[in-house]
Image (cartoon, rainbow, N blue to C red):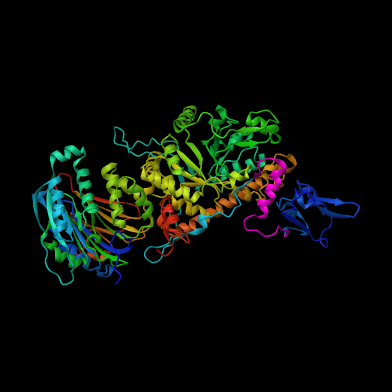
Amino acid sequence: MESFQREGDVRIPAGCAISSMFSKTGRKFSGEGMIKSISIMHDRSNGLGGGFAGYGIYPEYKDFYAFHVFYDSDDARHITEDFIDEHFDIVNLSKIPTKKNKNITDEPLIWRYFVTPLPTKLAQSQLEEDEYTVRCVVKINTHIKGAYVFSSGKNMGIFKAVGYPEDVGRFYRVDEYEGYAWTVHGRYPTNTPGWWGGAHPFGLLDYSIVHNGEISSYDANRRAIEMYGYRCTLQTDTEVITYMIDYLHRKQKLSLEECAHVIAAPFWSTIDRMNEDKKREYTYLRNTFSSLLINGPFSIILGFDGGLMALNDRLKLRSLVAAEKNDMVYFSSEESAIKIIEPNPDRIWYPKGGEPVIVTLNEGVEA
Amino acid sequence: MAINYIYPEYEVVRNYDRCISCRVCERQCANLVHHYDTKRGKMICDESKCVACHRCVALCPTRALKIVKSDHTFKENANWTGEKITNIYRQAESGGVLLASMGTPKNYPVYWDKILINASQVTNPSIDPLREPMETKVFLGHKNDKIVRDQYGRIKCDETPQLELQVPVMFSAMSYGSISYNAHKSLAMASKKLGIYYNTGEGGLHEDFYEYGPNTIVQIASGRFGVHPDYLKAGAALEIKMGQGAKPGIGGHLPGAKIVGDVSKTRMIPEGSDAISPAPHHDIYSIEDLRQLVYTLKEATNYTKPVIVKIAAVHNVSAIASGVARSGADIIAIDGFRGGTGAAPAAIRDNVGIPIELALASVDKRLRDEGIRNDVSLVVGGSIRSSADIVKAIALGADAVYIATSALIALGCHLCRSCHSGRCNWGIATQRPDLVKRLNPEIGSEKLVNLIHAWQHEIKEMMGGMGINSIEALRGNRAMLRGIGLTREELDILGIKHAGE
């Protein structure tokens, strides 16, 4: 029998459902609401991938990188653990608790490590802590066969699998974690890779992205970002968008709003109508990072330490709804997915194409 | 018959039932093919002088003329073709180099025609250019790789000099001398209307055209003809010509016969003297010398203009381009071996260099592998024939294209490939006043504007079909291309998959 190529060996377009909720006051809540929200959009997924990202869920280890890792075998685990041990101080390791679910099968070994870079190794590398960690994660993912780090941020975690997102949530018991922000993704790929690493959210350090769409600029973006040392091993939109955000936000130190003006840049005709200072800045950003402009339909929710950003492509070719109620902010593919968890929002709106909605914790609130 | 007799390649067929002996053909043909035989009271012709430029055909009021390929033939031989045999007769007679014009007519693979473009279906929507904005504007020049902020945290928008193009097309270098005043004026006027640029070539800039400076690229070639401070300051960008696709490795030669009047003045050389451009720049014998010239030009223009370095596509073009990118150039122009010329030795034109498609693909990849692709913009030329060629070039990795032959065809050129004779009946590649005046710059520029607008429409349609509404999202987007009938090796070099993959 002909076997399917794994994610990364082939590019697989996918449609999707996304949803998120966030408390500006840092109030913590479980992932239960996200399960409810995404299950109302059941038909936007096809059972081939679902996942969650929770922020603020590991307060007791908030200064440590939390690695979530899939292993195909114990051998892969041993090799990886040796590697992690060589580069990090492991303060805790365990299997990630799961609950059997008849709809979730073929599960790999799923482990979690709370780590901090070994000071001597870090000093030797002459890198900042984040960069050091990213490089180690990439090394594991590209060099150790059968091992895949799918979450690597601090005080946050990604939980994902092949299946419908509501089943994935039950499987990982996300209702037992509490965080101030959650995002969720249901996938509708047009091929059946059946690999857990291919599910979303996609994460890198604290960044996690859930995305609905299929970008037509993919190869232009991929080839541009690979020039800066990233390797797009999964060939998914979500992966390349995450790397672009990482490059623009963490490395170039652009604000999230400026990042949005690069990846969903205003049309030249819009820029031409701006005042001189603004025009100059927008032109400069768009021209300097012209290969990082994303074309084609997308709606994304970016999770980061202390906030969320929702962004649509500049023509708004994918649905994206936002709502507010007291300290809560919601983003979702469909209004129904918000109404099921908050029937009476104070405000509900459809963000314009290319205009980011950024929410962060109120001043003074600690994640 | 003498052995050097060569039967004409083309025959002029006149329908005497239609011919009214108005003698238009006679007056229009600078090659003196037609004349009126008063004794016999009819038009006759000497087809041995015919270059198949179609001027007489186009202007015959009764459609009495057509040009056909002669069926006269040598005994058929796949190895010793008629062309090879007659060339030997010619050279045995003259002892000279065979001259040719325009791009090679040889049957080399045209990779553009073996590449297919993608379109959206179902999983993402195509975009309708009639209803949505569709952006074709590009900026050419070095891009900064680090965001710097001032003390207030604002982004410092210290841009290196950029060329702004409304469509990713420019008219490539053709000198005043090789083409006529009116041809130059047509290109200049069209560039201004289109928001793009034309290129002076190595002939200097006629004083009448300084007003088009903001749309002019001034070239500095190995002969340095017409180069002076005002010339450098007049242009929007400076181009150092290191090579030309049609004749890599050799210089140029504009015969003294063409160095007349304003051509001589503009080139700053005496009337009637041959303008010979050396093969190399005699101040550039290595890459570090190129760097010096690049910075000399930047100094001379106070770092306000981008510097283009134009190279011919040769075997190790990617290594050369990488060196050029590190020499301070803002833009690299690569000219493929199918590119045109006003005159070149046929042996060189038909045998030296490589196709632009392969050169572009390998240069773009090499610059990305080395992390320096954003240091320069890439402009490619050397037979861009249609909007589809442009879309494919950009998807392979070009920022913009250079066109010259296409532009001349828009002005009326019929590709008779006889530019070197100086008797262009269409008023393009000639300095004879009676011929030059046949080209009206108002009409010529309008044709050029029409052509580029037509291509722009087609580019937008193809972009929209792919779900792309900004040309920068197409640049280097090789997943939008598939090869057809190409070998694995060719696909690997082009960095594309085969159709069906």
Tell how many labels: 0
- Percent of width and height locating residue B25: 78, 52
Q: Nearer the viewer, residue A1 or B415?
A: A1
Q: Is residue B479 left or right of residue B424?
A: left
Q: Is residue B150 visible?
A: yes
- Percent of width and height locating residue B198: 56, 41
Q: Nearer the viewer, residue A224 or B91?
A: B91
Magenta stretch: includes residue B91: yes
Q: Is residue A180 visible?
A: no
Magenta stretch: includes residue A287: no
Q: Nearer the viewer, residue A125 or B93?
A: B93
Q: Is residue B2 left or right of residue B363?
A: right
- Percent of width and height locating residue B472: 42, 50
- Percent of width and height locating residue A135: 22, 46
**Quadrant of image for the C terminus of chain B:** bottom left
Q: What residue span does the magenta drawing correspond to?
A: B71-100
Q: Is residue B3 left or right of residue A206?
A: right
Q: Nearer the viewer, residue B453 or B65?
A: B65
Compared with B234, B123 (above or below) is below
Q: Quadrant of residue B200?
A: top right
Q: Quadrant of residue B44?
A: bottom right
Rendered residue at 90%/51% (across/down): B38
